[in-house]
């Protein structure tokens, strides 16, 4: 059996080092970014970055254990945590390691990078704030159980959920608790910002709308366990559930607008949705990527992948990008669902793609982080 190093060499066969050197010099001009899970505080999963029609494999970065977290990309730097308990900063252009920080346990929480600070949690329940330049610890907070939820940031607070059945708001300056709201179950997904509120769903069957200022709460009954994160567009919220449904929610009326359920395949949705002005994209454990009409929730098309899709899709230009559990990374035409590009990696993927600076970055469970883009 080939070692991971040998597999990486084979994957990179044909990539010219001379061409890569030219590519590196162009990254400093990149203006778009992917600073947090799902790309923005509303978690819409839409990128401003434009990929070339046929992205090439530019570099890989290997660790001893896998990547489950999704990377953040800002200022030509890739920030990502690994299951080896290390948090890494890499050059977007080359994959060269710029720094690392040792956490106390596995990192499944995707980072948020805001105003020079990186926020993320680990499986020991620690929540960290690091200086983006150098990854030096600024402060650390201890929750009562693991933090898989990815953080969101607004004004002077950072928000995240925990397996201690709570949603936290910490003061960004020092990590002190601004407020804590206890829910009725684990909070695995990430909070989305909705005006002056934070919206988060978890394992208690409710959507929680919490006022950013003080945590004052309202709820919408979903009657379903939620493992993913919601996406917000205007006054509407969209989320997949473990009751095999995708829900559209009217936040003003606090009521369900529509429910989507595939007529034949009854499987949970762990993936988080990407939403545009007229369409929603979400992966399912039924091996399908579903494209739904945003107004009605009716399916416009579905695409069958090779394995279940826990990876959350990202829309960029005319395409939607995602990966499946077998390790295939896809780029589909967002109108038709036709495959325009695909790449077979060597390991299973549950992380989601991050797109910025003309690059797509995604990690696999066998410990390889991949970067794709224009090879010239």
Image (cartoon, rainbow, N blue to C red):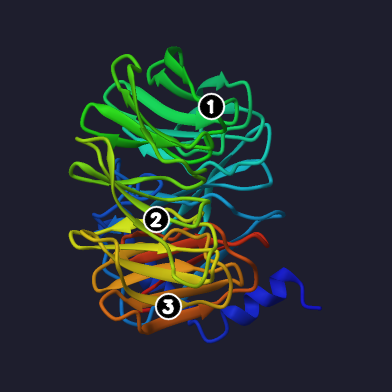
Q: Earlier in the sequence, mark 1 or mark 2?
A: 1
| Residue 123, x across and y down, in percent | 64, 35
Q: Label 2, on which residue?
A: 246
User: In the rendering, at what x and y percent does residue 54 appear?
Assistant: 37, 82
Q: Given this view, does label 3 or label 1 mark the residue nearer the observer?
A: 1
Graded by Cα atoms within 10 Å as few (under 14), some (14 to 19) or many (20 or more), the crowding at tag 1 reads few
Mark 3 to mark 1: distance in Å? 35 Å
Q: Is residue 54 above or below residue 357?
A: below
Using residue 319 as the reference point, say whether residue 277 is left or right of it. Answer: left
When asked about the image quadrant of residue 100, the answer is: top right
- Measuring 37% from the left and 65% from the top, which residue is drawn there? 359
Instruction: Name the residue carrying label 3.
Output: 303
| CA distance for labels 1 and 2 | 21 Å
Label 1: state its secondary structure. Answer: loop
> Mark number for residue 184?
1
Q: Is residue 132 above or below residue 257?
A: above
Q: Earlier in the sequence, mark 3 or mark 2?
A: 2
Q: Which residue is drawn at the image coordinates 48% and 37% (left, top)?
A: 205
Instruction: Classify 137 as above or below 302.
Output: above
Judge left or right: residue 80 versus residue 53.
right
Residue plotted at (70% across, 70% down): 5
- Residue 193 is situated, as x and y percent measured from the top left of the image, at 29, 35
Marks 1 and 2: CB-CB under 8 Å?
no
């Amino acid at each position: 059996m080939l070692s991971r190093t040998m597999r990486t060499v084979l994957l990179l066969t044909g990539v010219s080092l001379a061409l890569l050197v030219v590519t590196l010099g162009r990254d400093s001009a990149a203006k778009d970014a992917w600073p947090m899970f799902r790309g923005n505080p509303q978690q819409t999963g839409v990128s401003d970055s434009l990929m070339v029609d046929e992205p090439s494999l530019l570099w890989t970065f290997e660790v001893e254990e896998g990547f489950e977290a999704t990377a953040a990309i800002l200022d030509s730097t890739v920030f990502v945590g690994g299951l080896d308990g290390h948090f890494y900063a890499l050059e977007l252009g080359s994959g060269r390691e710029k720094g690392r920080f040792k956490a106390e346990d596995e990192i499944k929480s995707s980072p948020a990078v805001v105003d020079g600070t990186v926020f993320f949690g680990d499986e020991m329940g620690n929540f960290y704030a690091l200086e983006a330049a150098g990854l030096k610890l600024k402060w650390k907070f201890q929750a009562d159980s693991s933090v898989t939820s990815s953080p969101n940031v607004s004004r002077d607070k950072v928000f995240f959920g925990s397996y201690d059945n709570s949603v936290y708001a910490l003061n960004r300056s020092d990590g002190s608790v601004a407020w804590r709201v206890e829910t009725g179950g684990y909070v695995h997904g990430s909070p989305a910002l909705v005006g002056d509120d934070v919206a988060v769903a978890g394992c208690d069957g409710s959507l929680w709308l919490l006022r950013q200022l003080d945590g004052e709460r309202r709820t919408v009954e979903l009657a379903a366990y939620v493992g993913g994160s919601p996406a917000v567009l205007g006054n509407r919220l969209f989320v997949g559930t473990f009751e095999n449904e995708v829900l559209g929610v009217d936040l003003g009326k606090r009521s369900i607008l529509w429910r989507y359920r595939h007529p034949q395949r009854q499987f949970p949705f762990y993936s988080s949705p990407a939403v545009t002005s007229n369409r929603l994209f979400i992966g399912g454990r039924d091996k399908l990527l579903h494209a739904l009409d945003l107004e009605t929730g009716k399916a416009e098309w579905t695409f069958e992948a090779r394995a279940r899709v826990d990876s959350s899709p990202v829309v960029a230009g005319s395409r939607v990008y995602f990966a499946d559990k077998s390790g295939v990374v896809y780029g589909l035409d967002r109108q038709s669902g036709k495959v325009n590009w695909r790449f077979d990696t060597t390991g299973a993927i549950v992380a989601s793609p991050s797109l910025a600076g003309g690059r797509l970055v995604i990690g696999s469970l066998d410990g390889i982080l991949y970067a794709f883009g224009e090879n010239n």
